[in-house]
Image (cartoon, rainbow, N blue to C red):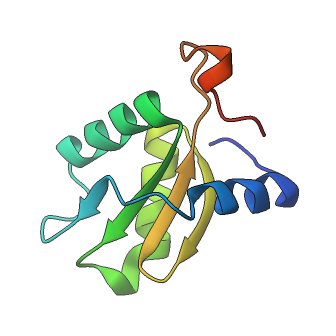
């Protein structure tokens, strides 16, 4: 899990404001395919939103499980949407998110 400072989390939240969720947690909960989808989305975008359609009461613990399994940084939860960040060194410098 990547540790983020409060300043970094604040900046990432503001950058994530306009983003749409790219992964949805539904009836099946956390599965291997969901974890792979989150991992790929983080590799492609660095900063993503995950929407909890089901398991809304367990979103904090499930987000922690996702974060640890994909080695990402936890930015925050707003409503039923979790925000995650993971730096990708393969993305060109000018396209990379700076935190």
Q: Quadrant of residue 85?
A: top right
Is residue 62 shown left or right of residue 16?
left
Give the mark count: 0
Q: Position of residue 64 (x, y in %)?
A: 51, 60
Residue 91 lies, with reference to residue 98, above or below; the image says: above
Q: Position of residue 19 (x, y in %)?
A: 46, 57
Is residue 61 shown left or right of residue 86?
left
Query: Relative to the observer, which residue lies in front, 94 or 35?
Result: 94
Q: Position of residue 15 (x, y in %)?
A: 64, 54
Q: Quadrant of residue 99?
A: top right
Quadrant containing the N terminus in the rendered view: top right
Is residue 86 shown left or right of residue 60?
right
Q: Residue pushed farthest left?
A: 27
Q: Quadrant of residue 24?
A: bottom left
Is residue 80 shown left or right of residue 75?
left
Residue 99 lies, with reference to residue 6, above or below; the image says: above
């Amino acid at each position: 899990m990547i540790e983020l400072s409060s300043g970094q989390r604040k900046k990432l939240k503001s950058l994530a404001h306009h983003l749409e969720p790219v992964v949805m947690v539904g009836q099946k909960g956390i599965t291997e395919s969901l974890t792979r989808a989150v991992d790929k989305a983080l590799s492609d975008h660095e900063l993503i939103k995950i929407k909890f359609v089901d398991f809304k009461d367990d979103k904090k613990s499930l987000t922690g499980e996702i974060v640890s399994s994909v080695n990402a940084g936890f930015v925050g939860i707003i409503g039923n949407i979790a925000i995650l960040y993971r730096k990708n060194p393969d993305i060109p410098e000018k396209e990379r998110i700076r935190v």
